[in-house]
Image (cartoon, rainbow, N blue to C red):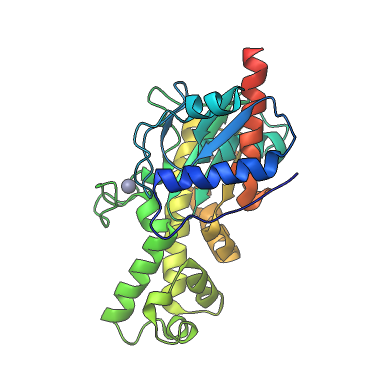
């Protein structure tokens, strides 16, 4: 499998993104003639119309008909879906969920996203919005999330919010988080989920507390979802999961406390890592090709 990665420029726009994609297409395809294209998009999409709704990070993508754009260029069928849905399909087709009939994928990273596979297919919901476990309310009195609601899973467990909360507490309480402060040499702007994980593994009081809080929030989300859907497994990916055992233990025990005793819980780390949205784009094209042939 050939993989090329090119980062976006500092102030990206749809136009610059498309130029990068075009470059990658010509590099990768050379004289190959694919039969279909699958696109994993990092934001909400209307998969049935092949239209991107928007990107939360890059302007210019609003209501962009990405499938017809590439269909005209390449003259083959093109399919698109949200990256969390595509990653879920990927883990089901090639990763930790092979052989299962149902799966819930969670990515805990810049945000917390989710994708649901039921009977081997992505469950989109009426508005293509199913799987938003990140905005499940854990604490109605909790801090405000970027979605405007309070105490969402994402507000309590995503990387940037963990770092924000650590910085706020470190500024307010000079006696807390000594190990974390030392790791970033007192440059609080350098704190990310990775440094928090590192400090937590060395017993830093503040970091341990934040990691456990994140794990409990994720576990409540997973336990409630298990009660509702009873999927065969949960697969967890994204950079924050790399924090490791302390986080995983908090997730598993909180999910177990939340789910009914009769509801089995299988919680696995991703088998495909950061490449699950990419390999999932292949699975997406394959699945859709089969259904249109
Ligand atoms: Zn939210």
Instruction: Compare residues 219 and 107 and report the one nearer the observer.
Output: 107
Compared to 204, does 211 lie above or below? above
Instruction: State the residue lying farthest toward the top.
Output: 293
Compared to 6, does 19 lie above or below? above
Instruction: Compare residues 209 and 112 and report the one nearer the observer.
Output: 112
Q: Disc count in the image?
A: 0
Where is residue 153 shown, x and y percent of the image? Answer: 39, 50
Where is residue 253 shown, x and y percent of the image? Answer: 53, 54
> Where is residue 35, by image quadrant?
top right
> Where is residue 288, by image quadrant?
top right
Whether residue 260 is visible: no
Q: Quadrant of the C terminus?
A: top right
Instruction: Compare residues 47 and 211 and report the one nearer the observer.
Output: 47
> What residue lies at 56% left-to-right and 35% top-to-bottom?
39
Where is residue 104 shown, x and y percent of the image? Answer: 55, 38
Q: Is residue 33 left or right of residue 214?
A: right
Where is residue 214 shown, x and y percent of the image? Answer: 44, 59
> What residue lies at 42% left-to-right and 44% top-to-bottom?
15
Whether residue 188 is visible: yes
Q: Quadrant of the N terminus?
A: top right
> What residue lies at 37% left-to-right and 61% top-to-bottom?
161
């Amino acid at each position: 499998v050939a993989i090329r990665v090119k980062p976006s420029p500092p102030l990206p726009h749809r136009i610059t993104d498309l130029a990068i994609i075009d470059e990658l297409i010509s590099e990768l395809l050379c004289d190959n003639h694919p039969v279909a294209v699958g696109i994993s998009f990092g934001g909400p999409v209307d998969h049935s119309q092949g239209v991107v709704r928007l990107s939360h990070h890059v302007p210019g993508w609003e209501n962009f008909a990405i499938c017809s754009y590439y269909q005209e260029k390449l003259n083959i069928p093109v399919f698109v879906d949200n990256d969390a849905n595509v990653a879920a399909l990927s883990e089901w087709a090639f990763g930790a969920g092979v052989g299962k009939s149902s799966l819930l994928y969670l990515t805990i990273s810049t945000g917390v996203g989710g994708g649901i596979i039921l009977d081997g297919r992505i469950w989109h919901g009426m508005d293509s919005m199913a799987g938003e476990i990140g905005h499940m309310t854990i604490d109605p009195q909790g801090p405000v999330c970027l979605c405007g609601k309070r105490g969402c899973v994402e507000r309590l467990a995503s990387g940037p919010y963990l770092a924000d909360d650590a910085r706020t507490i470190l500024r307010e309480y000079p006696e807390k988080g000594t190990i974390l402060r030392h790791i970033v040499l007192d440059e609080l702007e350098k704190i990310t989920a990775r440094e928090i994980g590192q400090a937590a593994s060395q017993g830093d009081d503040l970091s341990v507390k934040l990691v456990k809080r994140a794990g409990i929030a994720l576990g409540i989300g997973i336990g409630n979802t298990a009660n509702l859907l009873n999927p065969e497994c949960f697969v967890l990916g994204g950079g924050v999961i790399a924090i490791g055992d302390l986080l995983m233990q908090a997730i598993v025990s909180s999910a177990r406390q939340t789910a009914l005793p009769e509801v089995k819980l299988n919680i696995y780390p991703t088998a495909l890592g950061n490449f699950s949205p990419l390999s999932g784009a292949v699975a997406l094209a394959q699945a859709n090709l089969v259904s249109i042939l």
